[in-house]
Image: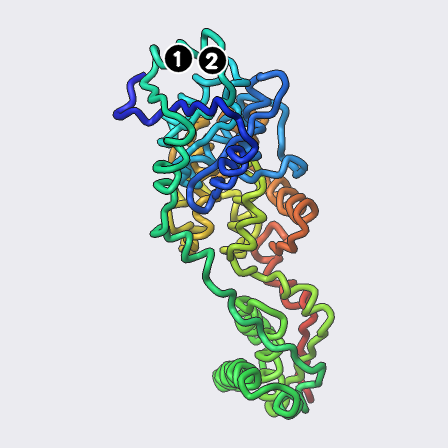
Amino acid sequence: MQLPEPRIWLVHDPNDLPESTRELHALADLERGVIVVRVTPGPMVLQAIALDLLTALGKDHTRHGILRAGEENWRRGAAWLSAEQVGHLIIDRAELLKPDRWRDFIGLAAHCGQSLWLIVHGASLTRGQRDMPDDWPITEITYKQFITPHAPAMQRPGDSRDVLRSAEPPTPFPTLPRSDFTTFRADCHALLSPEAFARVEVELADGARRMRRWLADAAEPDVEAITGRLRELIEDCLSTGQAVSRLRGAQAVGLMNGLLVRVDLERLAASTQTVLPRVDRQLVRQLRGYSDTHIPTIALLACLTGASPEAMTRLNVSDVTEDAVRVDGRSFAVPAVARCVLAAHIHRRLGAGALSDDALFADQHRGMQGQRNTVRALRTAINRLSKSSGLMLWCEYGSGEDRSRELWLQRRGVSMQVLR
């Protein structure tokens, strides 16, 4: 194998001081594209170094989806390396590895496009290790040469992910009083700060304006028609407070037009806290903790699109691009911070031989390419992720779109009655 340039480095640290180890491990920063694989002493089989690699990538081996299969875990590591855009792969305690394991890392770095740094401590190497520079384009340097001029070069201050990491989280929606719609606005005005009340007022006015328009389009209040409209009103809300504020405005207008809208705050809170969760750094950090790409990608698409499991079973590889996913003809933008999750899964599917018209989600236990996942399998994947990570991820339980529409508001504690 010939690399275009000598991007394999053998770093000698004969002194093996504790300070050197601390300096080396301080370089690890996945957000900046640098990972340090800490070789675990013991049998150097492929499964062992694959788990060390996944650990360096931030994977949690206690979560569902981890396997005792070295080749599969190695392929997962390759998928995440590429998706995370890792530029530097540092192997600490490389002297513990046999030459075959060095070749595994060399092949991995060549496949994924990283610079490979093999850090060897102490003065003695085996004959096979000493012969490696004769067979591969390996550049040998001292530890001082590595840590002084090369380590700063690994820092990428212009990386767009730094901007994402330093961005301030959005201000949460104000905590609202538990008032009925008849006194809700007055209580908010009395209890909230002017800035918080201004945010609530915007949502109140939006709910009232939309309800007024819907009722004006019909000669008499139509419960069935308004049901679909109310779902439209709150399905994009990112918090319970935002949903409550819109519904309070709609309730006031509805009552003046002979339509009583009831809202069960407990049921609404239990269901809307997780409606289309914000895809941010916190959520993506949880998803990146999985070594398997299957489960986090299903959960991510549930958050991004709100699609039912049935709709997700129809997704093909061609429905996902670098910055968007298309579900049943609708396109959803993928935030930059979450693209690594999709990229890792696409890498795995293409590596399994999937073509553009093949399933995005397939049963991995039925051959390399697998069979298209069932609705139940996708629903189970979301439930498992919720239990293992603590995240509350919502996705419609019903597999059919008609059932989803019919019971959507009912599950959220919203009901209507025409007053006679």
Q: Where is residue 52 in the image (x, y as percent from the top left)?
A: 57, 29
Is 362 positioned to the left or the right of 376 in the image? Answer: left
Question: Could you tell me which secondary element the residue under label 2 belongs to?
Answer: helix
**Residue furthest top in the image:** 127
Q: Quadrant of the N terminus?
A: top left
Disc 2 crowd rating (10 Å Cα; few below 14, some 14-19, many 20+) is: some
Q: From this viewpoint, is residue 353 visible?
A: no
Query: Closer to the camera, 339 or 370?
Result: 339
Give the label on residue 121, or none. Answer: none
Query: Closer to the camera, 239 or 236?
Result: 239
Specify the quadrant of the image occupied by residue 9: top left
Inter-mark Cα distance, 1 to 2: 7 Å
Give the colouring mode of the picture: rainbow
Give the label on residue 99, or none. Answer: 2
Q: Residue at x 48, y 22 (%)?
A: 14
Q: Name the residue under label 1.
A: 132
Q: From this viewpoint, is residue 187 visible?
A: yes
Q: In which quarter of the image is the C terminus?
A: bottom right
Residue type, mark 2 in image? Pro
Contact (CB < 8 A) between labels 1 and 2? Answer: yes
Residue type, mark 1 in image? Met
Q: Position of residue 169 (x, y in %)?
A: 51, 65
Query: Closer to the camera, 304 or 64?
Result: 64
Image label count: 2
Question: Could you tell me which secondary element the residue under label 1 belongs to?
Answer: helix
Query: Closer to the camera, 255 or 138?
Result: 138
Query: Closer to the N terminus: mark 1 or mark 2?
Result: 2
Q: Is 35 situated above or below 219?
A: above
Specify the quadrant of the image occupied by residue 184: bottom right
